[in-house]
Amino acid sequence: ERAAKSPMAAATSLAGWALKSHRGKPFRERQERRFFQSKGYSVSYFKDSSLGSRTGKFDLRKATSLSEPEDGKEAGAHLLLVLPGKKIVIKFENEADAWLKLWCSAVAESVLAQPLKQYHDIELHAEMIKEYGTSAEIKASSSLFASLASPRAPAPAPAPIPASTPAPEPAPEPAPAPEPAHAPEPA
């Protein structure tokens, strides 16, 4: 008999309160309490749990680094998420392990710092790909931040196909056949 999947293996969505750094300021200096909604790779955050006033969003596929913050200005936080042009420091209010498992399983394993690799769940990662792997990129609400919300940069374009080699020179025309021998004309 097959073992049943754990309930967490299929939990590709989560919602709850967290503190996040504000506008690039160090976490200990300035943080905002936001209601986070994570569905697949898409993460949105709001001023309140009514989901009426979204203040930001990002796509976990775009992450270039996910690590534990260093002590000092980021002390007390759970995650340091780096996206192109943006750094977000987050402290989850509840279910920190569930959030860590979800986000660490959503990002490419190569962007995870070693201490967070323990949260990467292969089954959850496969479920994310199955459910959301082909989902459209997330568009930012402001064109100024559009590059921050879209998924990871696409894979580099394949190398150009080398120009085809010139066609071989046509074979020379065969020599004309000799004229048929004529019988001598009678004199």
Image: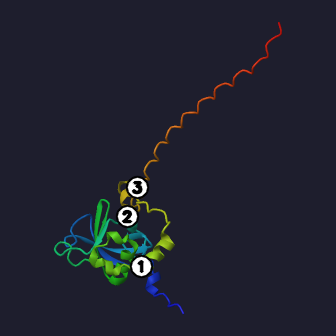
Q: Which colouring convention does the figure follow?
A: rainbow
Q: Secondary structure at mark 2?
A: helix
Label 2 sits on what residue type? Lys
**Residue 58: which disc?**
none
Q: Nearer the viewer, residue 80 or 3?
A: 3
Residue at the far right: name it: 186
Q: For the point 39% across and 62% down, which residue is it?
A: 152
**Label number found at residue 62:** 2
- Nearer mark to the viewer, of 1 and 2: 1
- Earlier in the chain: of badge 2 and badge 3, it is 2
Q: Residue furthest bottom?
A: 1
Q: How far apart are the two marked residues, 1 and 2, measured between alpha carbons?
A: 19 Å
- Which amino acid type is marked by label 1? Ile
Q: Which amino acid type corresponds to the residue marked 3 in the rendered image?
A: Pro
Q: Nearer the viewer, residue 9 or 184?
A: 184
Q: Which residue bears the numbered disc 3?
A: 156
> Residue shown at 46%/87% (left/top)?
7
Query: Which residue is the site of mark 1?
Result: 122
Report helix, strand or loop for mark 3: loop
| Residue at point 58%, 33% (across, down) | 171
Tell which of 167 and 81 is nearer to you.
Answer: 167
Give the x, y percent position of residue 64: 32, 65
Q: Quadrant of the C terminus?
A: top right
**Is any part of residue 78 visible from this angle?**
no
